C-alpha cells in the first residue's frame, strides 16, 4: 500500500517535471505568464527624473515612460509597479518580486554577471552636485581626493565603484539609501559634494532654490559615461529578445520622444547606432 | 545559492570593523539615554505643572511613536531649521532620547519602589533632600532599576540597525553596502544575525548574574 | 504651502498608509499570540527536547535584531527558493519576533498561577490538556495582559520597519511624499501624530478594555 502510494507520488512528480520542462522549451516563464494575461511587474526606485512613483504608485520618469511605449508596441498594456530601495532592485528581480527593472540602470560588468540587460535606451553621464559657486572647485573624483571633501552617493550606485576605481579613500565616502537621502545629506551639511547622474543632479539643483550647482558632466572621466538598459532575469531570454525587437521599432520615434520629453530626455541621450549591451557589459 | 566560506572570510574584517561602530553607537546612545532619562524623570517629578505636564506628554509621545519615523524626522527636518547634524549625531541623539523616555519610567518605578517610610524616617532625622537621595533612597532604588536598565541596554543594541537607514556606518549599513557591491546577500545578512546573537546572549546572561550579585550585596536574597 | 493645504492634499494618502499599518499590525499580533502560546507552553514542558527547542527559538529571536530578521526573510530566503510577498515577509518577521517575547510572558503567567490550582485539578482527575485549557489558561489572562499590552504597543511601533521592504504602510507613504515634496516637517510630523493617535486613542483603550473583561470573567473586577 505504502509503496504503491510512493510510486504514485514519484510518477506524479516526474510527470510534473516533464510537463514543466516541456513547457519551458517553448518560451521562458515570463513570456508564458504575459501570454496568459498576467500583468508585467515593473520594479524601480525613487530617482527623479529617471523613474519614480506617482501619488498612486503609477510609473513616472522617462525610463518608465519609454518602457511603456515598448510594451505597448508588444501589445502589453497590463502592468503593476513595485517601488524599492535602489540597492534592493537586483535582489528583488532575482527573487521574482517583479519582472523587469525600469530604474534606469547603467549597464555595468558587475551587474551583467547577475542580470540581463536590454539594448541600450540611451547614453548618460554623472556629475557632481556642489554648493552654489563651487567654492572648493570640485569637478571630478580627483578633485574630491585633493580637497579631502566628503563625497555622498547612494548605496549600490555605479558611482561607488567608480569612486573606488578613481582612488577616493573610503573615509571620504558617505553612502546613503538613495537620491532623496543624497539631497538631505547635502542640505544638512553632512557632505561637501554629491556624485550622481547628471539628470539627478539637475533635478536637485532645481529643487534647491539656487543653493547648489551641477558641474559639467564632460569634466568627469570619459569611462564613467554609461549606457542604460532595462534589467531582466537571466532566465527570461525570450522576453528579452521580444522586447529588443519591439524597441528597435520605436526607439527615437515620435511616441518615444513625446513620452520622455517632459522628463528632459532629448535626442542627445539616444544611444547611437554602434552602442551595444555586449560592449558595455565587457567594458564598463 | 550556496554559502561561500571564502567570501564570508573575505568580508569578515569589514564586518568586524562595523561591529565596533555598532557597539560604539549602542554605548554612546545608552549613555545619552541614561542621562536624559534622569532629566526626564526629574522633570516629571517636579511639583511645577508648567514643567511636569509638558515633560510627561513628551515622554508619552516619544514612547508611543516608532523610532524609525523619529530618525527620519530628525534627519530630514533638523536641517530645514538650520540645525546641521551629522548622521551619527542625529542618530545618537534620537536613539538616546527614545530610550531615555523608557529609562525615565524605569527610574520612576524604582523610586516608587522604595517604601514611603524611608522618606519619612529621613525627614524625621533632619537629613537634607540631597543627602537623603544619595545615602538612603538611591542605594535602595538602584537594584530595583537594574533589571530594567539592563533590558534597555540590550534593547538599544538591537535597535542600532535602524541607524543604517539614515547612513550611520554600523553593521547593517555595511552588510547593505556589501550586498549592493557584490550582489551576495546570504553571507552578509546571516553574519549580521550571528554577530548580534554572539554579543547579545552573553550580555543578557551577564546582566542576570549582575542583578543577582547586586541583590545579594544588598542583603536581599529573596530571589 | 500652509499646513492646512498640506493636510487636505496628503492626509487621505497617509490615511491609506495607516490602514495598511493596521492590517500588518493585526495580522502580526494574531501570529505573535499563537507563537507565544505554543512556545510559552513548550518552555514549561518536562520533556527535555521540547523545552530545549522552545528555549533555542526564544533566545534566537530575542538575541538577533528585528530588522536583521526582516531583511533575512526578505532578501535571503528567496535565494533558497522561498519568495514571500513583502506583506507576508513583514507579518512573519514581526509575528515570530514578538512571539518570542510573548512566550516569556505566557510562561511567567502560567508559573504565577497558584500551585493549589494544579493540585485541585489533578484531584478532580482532569487530563493534563483540559487542566491547562479549563483551569490554568483562563486565569493567566489577568496576569499576562498588562505586560502583553506593552508589547502590543511596541509591535505597533515596529510595524514601521515593513516600509523598508516595500510594504506601502504609513511610513512608506510618508517617505514617498517626502521624496517628491520635501515637506519633511509636515509629512514626518503628521506621520508621528498618526502613530501616536493610533496608540493612545485606539490601541491602549482597547487593551485596557480587554484587561477589564478578563478581570470580570474571573470575578476580580
Image: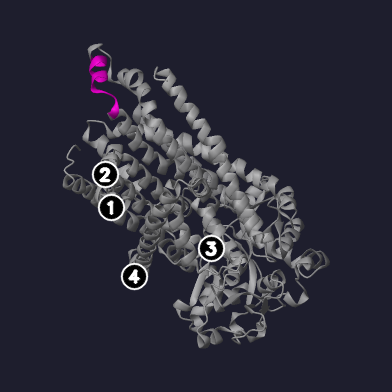
Secondary structure of the residue carrying numbered label 2: helix
Secondary structure of the residue carrying numbered label 1: helix
The magenta segment:
C112-122
- Looking at this view, is B82 or C207 the one in front? B82
Say whether mark 3 and mark 2 are on the same chain. Answer: no
* Dot label at residue B13: 4
Say whether mark 1 and mark 2 are on the same chain. Answer: yes
The percent position of residue B124, horizontal first and vertical second, equals: 26, 41
Secondary structure of the residue carrying numbered label 4: helix
Query: Magenta stretch containing residue C114, yes or no?
Result: yes
- 1 and 3 marks in contact (CB < 8 Å): no
Residue furthest to the top in view is C124
In three-dimensional space, the C-alpha distance between marks 2 and 4, rounded to whole angstroms, equals 56 Å
- 4 and 1 marks in contact (CB < 8 Å): no
**Foreground tag (1 vs 3):** 1
- 2 and 1 marks in contact (CB < 8 Å): yes
Query: Magenta stretch containing residue A227, yes or no?
Result: no
- 2 and 4 marks in contact (CB < 8 Å): no
Q: Which residue is mark 2?
A: B122
Say whether mark 4 and mark 3 are on the same chain. Answer: no
Amino acid at each position: 500500500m505504502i509503496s504503491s502510494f510512493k510510486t504514485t507520488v514519484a510518477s506524479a512528480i516526474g510527470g510534473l517535471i516533464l510537463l514543466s520542462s516541456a513547457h519551458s522549451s517553448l518560451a521562458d516563464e515570463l513570456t508564458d505568464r504575459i501570454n496568459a494575461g498576467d500583468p508585467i511587474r515593473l520594479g524601480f526606485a525613487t530617482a527623479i527624473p529617471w523613474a519614480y512613483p506617482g501619488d498612486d504608485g503609477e510609473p513616472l520618469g522617462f525610463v518608465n515612460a519609454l518602457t511603456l511605449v515598448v510594451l505597448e508596441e508588444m501589445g502589453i498594456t497590463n502592468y503593476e509597479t513595485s517601488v524599492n530601495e535602489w540597492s534592493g532592485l537586483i535582489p528583488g528581480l532575482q527573487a521574482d518580486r517583479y519582472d523587469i527593472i525600469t530604474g534606469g540602470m547603467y549597464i555595468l560588468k558587475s551587474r551583467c554577471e547577475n542580470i540581463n540587460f536590454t539594448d541600450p535606451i540611451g547614453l548618460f553621464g554623472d556629475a557632481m552636485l556642489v554648493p552654489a559657486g563651487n567654492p572648493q572647485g570640485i569637478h571630478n573624483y580627483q578633485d574630491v581626493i585633493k580637497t579631502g571633501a566628503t563625497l555622498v552617493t547612494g548605496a549600490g550606485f555605479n558611482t561607488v565603484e567608480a569612486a573606488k576605481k578613481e582612488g577616493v579613500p573610503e573615509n571620504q565616502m558617505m553612502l546613503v539609501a538613495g537620491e532623496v537621502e543624497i539631497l538631505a545629506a547635502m542640505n544638512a551639511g553632512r557632505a561637501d559634494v554629491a556624485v550622481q547622474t547628471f539628470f539627478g543632479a539637475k533635478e536637485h539643483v532645481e529643487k534647491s532654490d539656487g543653493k547648489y550647482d551641477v558641474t559639467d558632466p564632460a569634466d568627469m572621466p570619459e569611462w564613467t559615461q554609461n549606457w542604460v538598459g532595462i534589467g531582466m532575469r537571466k532566465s527570461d531570454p525570450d522576453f528579452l529578445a521580444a522586447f529588443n525587437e519591439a524597441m528597435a521599432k520605436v526607439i527615437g520615434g515620435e511616441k518615444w520622444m513625446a513620452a520622455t520629453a517632459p522628463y528632459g530626455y532629448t535626442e542627445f541621450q539616444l544611444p547611437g547606432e554602434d552602442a551595444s549591451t555586449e560592449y558595455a557589459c565587457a567594458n564598463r | 545559492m550556496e554559502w561561500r566560506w571564502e567570501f564570508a572570510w573575505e568580508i569578515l574584517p569589514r564586518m568586524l570593523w562595523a561591529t565596533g561602530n555598532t557597539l560604539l553607537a549602542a554605548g554612546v546612545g545608552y549613555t545619552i539615554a541614561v542621562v536624559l532619562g534622569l532629566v526626564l524623570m526629574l522633570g516629571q517629578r517636579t511639583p511645577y505643572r508648567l514643567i511636569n505636564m509638558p515633560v510627561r506628554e513628551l515622554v508619552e509621545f516619544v514612547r508611543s511613536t516608532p523610532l524609525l519615523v523619529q530618525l527620519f524626522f530628525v534627519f530630514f527636518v533638523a536641517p530645514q531649521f538650520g540645525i546641521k547634524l551629522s548622521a551619527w549625531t542625529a542618530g545618537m541623539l534620537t536613539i538616546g532620547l527614545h530610550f531615555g523616555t523608557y529609562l525615565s519610567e524605569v527610574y520612576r518605578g524604582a523610586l516608587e519602589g522604595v517604601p514611603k517610610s524611608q522618606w519619612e524616617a529621613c525627614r524625621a532625622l533632619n537629613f537634607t533632600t540631597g543627602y537623603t537621595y544619595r545615602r538612603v533612597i538611591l542605594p535602595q532604588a538602584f537594584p530595583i532599576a537594574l533589571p530594567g536598565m539592563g533590558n534597555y541596554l540590550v534593547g538599544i543594541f538591537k535597535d542600532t540597525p535602524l541607524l543604517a537607514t539614515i547612513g550611520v556606518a554600523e553593521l547593517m549599513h555595511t552588510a547593505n553596502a556589501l550586498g549592493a557591491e557584490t550582489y551576495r546577500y546570504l553571507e552578509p545578512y546571516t553574519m549580521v544575525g550571528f554577530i548580534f546573537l554572539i554579543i547579545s546572549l552573553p550580555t543578557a546572561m551577564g546582566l542576570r548574574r549582575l542583578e543577582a550579585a547586586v541583590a545579594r550585596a544588598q542583603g536581599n536574597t529573596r530571589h | 504651502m500652509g499646513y492646512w493645504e498640506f493636510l487636505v492634499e496628503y492626509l487621505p494618502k497617509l490615511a491609506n498608509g495607516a490602514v495598511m499599518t493596521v492590517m500588518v499590525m493585526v495580522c502580526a499580533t494574531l501570529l505573535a499570540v499563537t507563537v507565544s502560546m505554543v512556545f510559552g507552553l513548550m518552555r514549561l514542558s518536562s520533556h527535555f527536547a521540547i523545552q530545549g527547542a522552545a528555549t533555542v527559538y526564544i533566545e534566537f529571536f530575542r538575541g538577533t535584531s528585528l530588522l536583521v530578521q526582516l531583511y533575512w526573510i526578505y532578501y535571503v530566503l528567496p535565494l533558497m527558493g522561498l519568495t514571500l510577498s513583502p506583506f507576508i515577509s513583514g507579518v512573519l518577521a514581526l509575528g515570530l519576533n514578538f512571539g518570542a517575547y510573548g512566550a516569556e510572558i505566557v510562561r511567567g503567567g502560567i508559573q504565577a498561577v497558584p500551585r493549589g490550582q494544579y493540585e485541585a485539578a489533578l484531584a478532580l482527575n482532569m487530563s493534563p490538556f483540559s487542566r491547562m485549557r479549563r483551569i490554568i489558561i483562563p486565569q493567566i489572562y489577568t496576569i499576562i495582559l498588562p505586560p502583553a499590552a506593552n508589547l502590543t504597543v511596541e509591535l505597533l511601533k515596529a510595524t514601521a520597519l515593513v516600509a523598508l521592504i516595500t510594504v506601502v504602510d504609513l511610513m512608506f507613504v510618508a517617505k514617498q511624499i517626502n521624496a517628491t515634496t520635501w515637506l519633511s516637517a509636515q509629512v514626518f510630523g503628521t506621520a508621528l501624530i498618526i502613530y501616536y493617535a493610533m496608540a493612545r486613542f485606539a490601541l491602549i483603550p482597547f487593551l485596557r478594555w480587554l484587561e477589564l473583561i478578563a478581570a470580570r470573567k474571573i470575578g476580580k473586577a
